[in-house]
Amino acid sequence: MREEKAEQISIILKKMPKEVGNYMTFAHWLYVFGVIIVVLTMILRRNVVIPCIVFTFLLGWVYLGSFIGGIQALFNASIVAAKDLFSIFYIIAIMVAMLKSISVTGADQMMVTPLKKLMVSPLISYLVLCVATVFISLFFWPTPAVPLIGALLVPAAIQAGLPPMLGAMALAFAGQGLALGGDVIIQGAPGLTAGAANIPVEMVTVRGGLLSLITGVVAISLGYWMNKKDIKEFQATVKQAALTGETIPVVKQQEDVELVKPQYAPFLVYLLAISMVGVILSMFIFDLKGGDASALLGGVGLLIMLIASLLTYGAKGLDSMADFLADGLVFAFKVMGPIIPIAGFFFMGNPEAVVGILGEGAPGFLFDVGKMISEVIPPTGILAGFGMLILGAITGLDGSGFSGLPVVGTLAGAMASGKASVAAGLGAIGQIGAIWSGGGTLVAWCSLVAVAGIVGVPVLDLVRKNFIPVIAGLVVSTIIGVLFLM
């Protein structure tokens, strides 16, 4: 009976008029409705896994016209998302496992001690995290910056009274937001935007860098100010822990363990510090960026874990390293596993990723919606600026940030009617909208999971904390961009 009813529904869906607009179909509107439900669910402070699963299934059923196809699309979406996100999962697992391998000797505590001289207060710690993250991210992109800063500076900042959530916000604002939004050193983002708009890349670089800086200053300042109450409460916790001798959790809550061969702790601290400096220098000398830089960092992390395991446990290190790595993977998937079905739904909006889910010829639902919105945006003025900002943010909802830049650049060039300064201004606004949202600080299925994972905070809570400061920063920078850069 159920099979017959499912078949009847499938026939009805096939007979429904597909074209709602020039290229908008019923499936497109279903996707839009799904996005609205997901956003409302997040606003209501509930997990969005179930809405994403439901709408992934419904979209697959509607587009393919098959109940079975909808079920298969649900699985395929998660597989595509898992493949795309696994590199982030694994780098987190490696860094957590590496830290655990050296912590059994007490090296982690020894590593934190000298940094206390720099981390003298929550405010100074917050600013140090931001500056260090911006510097590394500008040269090597945020992906390798997050585990580096997370491993070396966040523990000291937490010991100085900075709440872990605020530490994660600092990494996100400074790395995935400010540095990546402008991308003034590597110029991958402005290169894509300018190329699509057919204008000189330096015009977008200057404007994008300035607007991203403004957004970052506003977000960083507002983020700290809005969490002053949390800082005071956390400082009280730190003081109480100091009096009672308790340990404040840093990066990850770990069980108390008896130190093993603490005499090797100084060597492991120096090994870690020298290795991280070597990674940074190698990135610069050999021009390693993005995935190559992350691969170098991950490989070094595995080697340090190997050395620490054998040095500490001897022959038993063959088993202990496997245990450390397993613990790291369990931690990574426990923190970010729910992100996979969420990302799967939004990947259906990307014209490249959706092919692996719904097959050849499937449209990028989110990108098509962005094109529809662009058709009603006037060429100049406040409405044009905010229209481009919203369009950029929509393309960033797929969790990439960069995938929407060609669309943003093309539309900016088309709307500018040959005026390079207008195209550069509009393109820069769309660029920061796309990268700040999806690159990112506002969606839980982008590289923000790396920030949340390495610091050890819930990624959805981090998104909620980021929302008001980032939106305020984007609004201020867009107004300045419209008034002075177009």
Image (cartoon, helix red, strand yellow):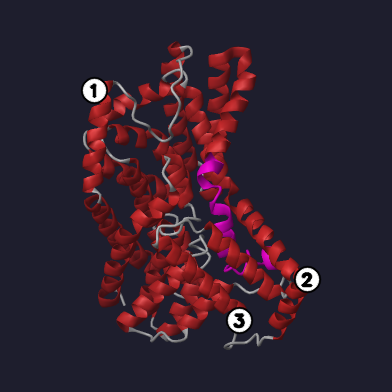
Q: Position of residue 143 (x, y in %)?
A: 48, 47
Asked whether residue 476 is drawn in magenta, I would say no
| Cα–Cα gap, marks 1 and 2 | 68 Å
Is any atom of residue 200 visible in this view? Answer: no
Q: Secondary structure at mark 1?
A: helix
For residue 23, above or below residue 57? below
The one of 226 and 12 positioned closer to us in this rendering: 12
Query: Are there few (<14), some (14-19), or many (20+) residues within 10 Å of tag 3?
Result: some
Q: Residue at x 75, y 69 (%)?
A: 2
Q: Position of residue 221 (x, y in %)?
A: 24, 54
| Amino acid at pointer 2 | Met
Q: Which of the numbered marks, if any, corresponds to residue 243?
A: 1
| Amino acid at pointer 3 | Phe
Magenta stretch bounds: 332-358
Q: Which quarter of the image is occupied by the C terminus?
A: bottom left
Instruction: Place residue 115 in its image quadrant.
Output: top left
Q: Is residue 26 left or right of residue 432?
A: right
Disc with the residue nearer the chain's start (3 vs 1): 3
The one of 376 and 257 positioned closer to us in this rendering: 257
Q: Secondary structure at mark 3?
A: helix
For residue 61, above or below residue 135? below
| Cα–Cα gap, marks 3 and 2 | 27 Å
Asked whether residue 357 is drawn in magenta, I would say yes
Q: Position of residue 461 (x, y in %)?
A: 39, 51
Magenta part, dominant SS: helix
Residue that mark 2 sits on: 1
| Cα–Cα gap, marks 3 and 1 | 62 Å
Q: In front of the other: label 3 or label 2?
A: 2
Q: Secondary structure at mark 2?
A: loop
Residue that mark 3 sits on: 26
